[in-house]
Image (cartoon, rainbow, N blue to C red):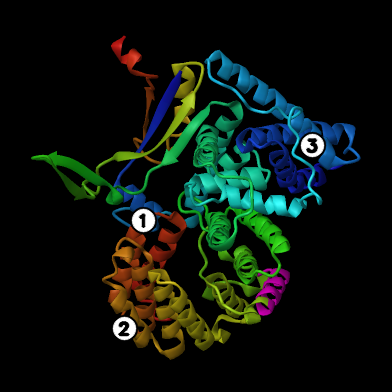
Amino acid sequence: MKYMILLFGSQQDYDVLSGRATDRPAMSAEQVAAMHTHMETVHQALAESGELVDARGLSAPAHARRVQVRAGAPVVTDGPYPETQEVLAGYTIVECASFDRATEIAAGLVDPDAPGGYVDVRPVLDGVEDLAG
Amino acid sequence: MSELPVEDLLRELAPQVLGALVRRYGHFDTAEDAVQEALIAATDRWPRDGVPESPRRWLITVASRRLTDLLRHEQARMRREDRVARWALPEQWRAPAADQPPADADDTLILLFLCCHPALSPASQIALTLRAVGGLSTAEVARAFLVPEATMTRRISRGKQRIRDTGLRFAPPTGAERVDQLAAVLHVLYLIFTEGYARTAGPGLLRADLSAEAIRLARLMHRLLPEDAEVTGLLALMLLTDARAPARIGPHGELVPMAEQDRGRWRAEQIAEGVALITAALPGGVVGAYQVQAAIAAVHDEAPRAQDTDWAQITALYEVLLGICDNPVVALNHAVAVAMSRGASAGLALLAGLAGDVRLADDPRLPAARAHLWEMVGERDAAREAYRMAAARSTNLAQQRYLNARADRLAAGDGSR
């Protein structure tokens, strides 16, 4: 069974990561390097155990476009999110033995330094037949 | 026997073996799979049993046998599907012996032309080149590009499908076609290099493996076509750019601009080789874009300190490059060179002219260049805002952090720079 682990972040989180202070100070080079080392270690272990399917980070919410269709014509909004709104920042898809194992993996992806930090785990459906039940 | 020599040997032989198989039996796509399997078998057995007397013949024998199996299997499947199967199996059809057996070198070159054919998508060209000519496994190529193996497998099979559907033949292109296809090969090698040198996404900035592989393939090209000045130019450009890699990244993965790099860490031998190559190539007639870019890289590399850089010469070389290609990034670099040789205001005036270019609309490079020049002339507020804008446009973390740090330096009222 596949599970998608969803990671969240706001534009502010991206800003401090990119070295720009907001209400919070910018992250130092050491902090950024430590974060990357941690993510790399986790994903390397998943690759070696054969549980990793895919992992991707998304660019900052400021680069997002929202597309709506009104009267048959697309209407595009650039950077549609408020600064502090938590949006999808990245995902890791794993294929593993159980929901509990996926939960265990997910715990390793929660930022221990962010108060109230969290990730979500969602079982991935294989196809339309799953939806039909 | 250590692992490295076997691996190096295999990767050198890979395109020769594939070339020999395709020349003899056709079926590029299936032959390519067969060679991959032979390489895996050799990786497994040679370190254990020793390298055979003729490694090349060993590989061709194993790969031919595997090709026969694969084709039989395919024929059986087609028969089951009630389709006509008229493929020749390797033992049924031998190409008539030519007066002179084609040199391995020719085969490798034809393979490069085939894998980089303009009919293929850039993603497939790159994947196929690294596998069929570079001798890398799908897993290795996938790892280099940070994509799942299944994605890379699809890219490779799409490329092969396209070769089959387009009816591309295993033969050297001629005339005008050859000129276009050679340019395509060079472009693919250049893309592999830049992908390694400045990756567009993800945390780090350098992927040494891809740059090294691009250089290896460019060396191979240069050995095959020593008289081609653009091939030489591309190899020189890669060597001269890659020579700076050790100084380009700081201890925590941060980007260090060329002016602030510790030049003692540049690779002197690589610079010497690149300079020698480009010096030999330049007088050879029509000058191409890779040669000019290599010449620019050489001028940078030869300056003992940043302030010794011969900006007047770099400016002149960018003017030559502008005459060859209409590219806004070249125009931007030219403006920066003008700023360094004739003063920041002259450079800013040129950059102002680029502001309306739609090709640069979302590009962080224009605001970054303006920021640097505004900083030079003491327009601190404008510089700071431009650095921020460039950081916001960039999707490369190392670049963003560098640009934001420059902005912060101006905000802190540090007048030293």
Q: Is residue B134 above or below residue B43?
A: below
Secondary element at image label 1:
loop
Q: Quadrant of residue B326?
A: bottom left
The residue tagged 2 is B349
**Which sits earlier in the primary sequence, circle 3 or circle 2?**
3
Which numbered mark, 3 or 1, is in the foreground of this view?
3
Query: In the current view of this chain or complex, which residue is farthest to the top?
Result: A133
Question: What amino acid does circle 1 point to?
Answer: Pro
Can residue B251 be seen here? The reply is no
Query: In the current view of this chain or complex, which residue is farthest to the right?
Result: B53
* Horizontal side, residue A74 vs residue A6: left or right: left
The residue tagged 1 is A25
The subunit letter for the residue under badge 2 reads B
Residue range of the region highlighted in magenta in the rendering: B266-280
* Horizontal side, residue B217 vs residue A22: left or right: right
* Crowd tier of the residue under label 3, counting other residues whose Cα lies within 10 Å: few below 14, some 14–19, many 20 or above: many
Residue B288 in the image, given as x and y percentages of width and height: 55, 73
The prevailing secondary structure element of the residues shown in magenta is: helix
Q: Is residue B14 above or below residue B304?
A: above
Question: What amino acid does circle 3 point to?
Answer: Leu
Mark number displayed over residue B59:
3
Task: Measure how far apart labels 3 and 1 are at the Cα level.
Answer: 59 Å
Task: Measure how far apart labels 3 and 2 are at the Cα level.
Answer: 61 Å
